[in-house]
Image (cartoon, rainbow, N blue to C red):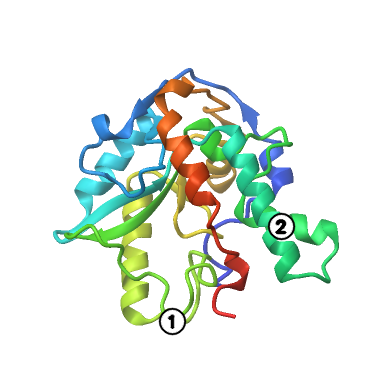
Amino acid sequence: MDHTKGRPEPIRALDRIKERENGEPLVDIRTVAPEVHILRPQVIPWCRETVARMLREAAQNLPRGFRLGVIEAWRPLDRQKRIFDFIYRCAQEAFPNRSPASLRRTTCRFVAPVDHPAPPGHATGAAIDVNLLNDSLEPLDVSSPYTHFAASATYTLGLAPESHKNRMLLVETMLEAGFSNCRDEWWHYSYGDAGWAVRTGRDSCIYGMIELDPSLYDEQEKLWLETFKDRKNPFLEGR
């Protein structure tokens, strides 16, 4: 990746961010930002109100022929922990000679832990995972000639020209709407959480942990648990 772009966000830096929760509610993205497409039925389509409005702005600013899709939004802590544990097991399988500390660092690069002062961005309603779509709502190529996970870094070098063009369109559109990007994950953007604060040089954030009535996402959680059973090891893609 091009290390001159983006800003690292080590966990120790996230943990130093002061939380000044502003009390803004979670809202349904489908209501506030109808131009944005929810790409999977297991997505819990809720986020902070300002984040939803920013998503709508980003979708409206895309050139004709392009759409914005959401892969993940607000996430309960239980789901976050299951993802963390799964990625850790995947790392163990892919890198059997690494120490537990090294495996944890690898895992934390892609999934925020739940046992630190700074809550995971998705659990605050501030973080959104997105993809660029065509008019037929099909995901556009942003990773060739690599696999999706091998090209996870936002500023991956060596992308095919069309993939690079698509990826930069997504990045620039989201940044112009006010989001910050996790440079290790081209799909991950946030506003108002600890990650956003570190990336933008602030010492405090405006969103902390927030809960959602489980009855509002019971069906999505059942679907997520079912589909998660078949999830493959991302570290072994292309091997």
Q: In this image, 25 relative to 196: left or right?
A: left
Q: Which numbered circle lies on residue 182? A: none
- Relative depth, front residue between 11 and 225: 225
Q: Where's residue 123, x and y in %?
A: 55, 34
Q: Is residue 157 above or below residue 55?
A: below
Residue underneath mark 1: 145
Q: Residue at x 20, y 43 (%)?
A: 35
Q: Where's residue 117, x and y in %?
A: 71, 32
3D distance between C-alphas at marks 1 and 2: 27 Å
Label 1 environment density (alpha carbons within 10 Å; few <14, some 14–19, many ≥20): some
Given the image, on which type of amino acid does mark 2 rest? Arg
Q: Is residue 155 above or below residue 190?
A: below
Picture quarter with the N terminus:
bottom right
Q: Residue at x 43, y 21 (%)?
A: 215
Q: Quadrant of residue 73?
A: top left
Q: Nearer the viewer, mark 1 or mark 2?
A: 2
Q: Residue at x 48, y 17 (%)?
A: 23
Q: Is residue 195 above or below residue 216?
A: below
Q: In this image, 67 relative to 177: left or right?
A: left
- Of labels 1 and 2, earlier in sequence is 2
Q: Residue at x 35, y 51 (%)?
A: 174
Label 2 environment density (alpha carbons within 10 Å; few <14, some 14–19, many ≥20): some
Residue 42 visible: yes
Q: Quadrant of residue 194?
A: top right
Disc 2 element: helix
Residue underneath mark 2: 89
Q: Where's residue 27, x and y in %?
A: 35, 26
Picture quarter with the C terminus:
bottom right
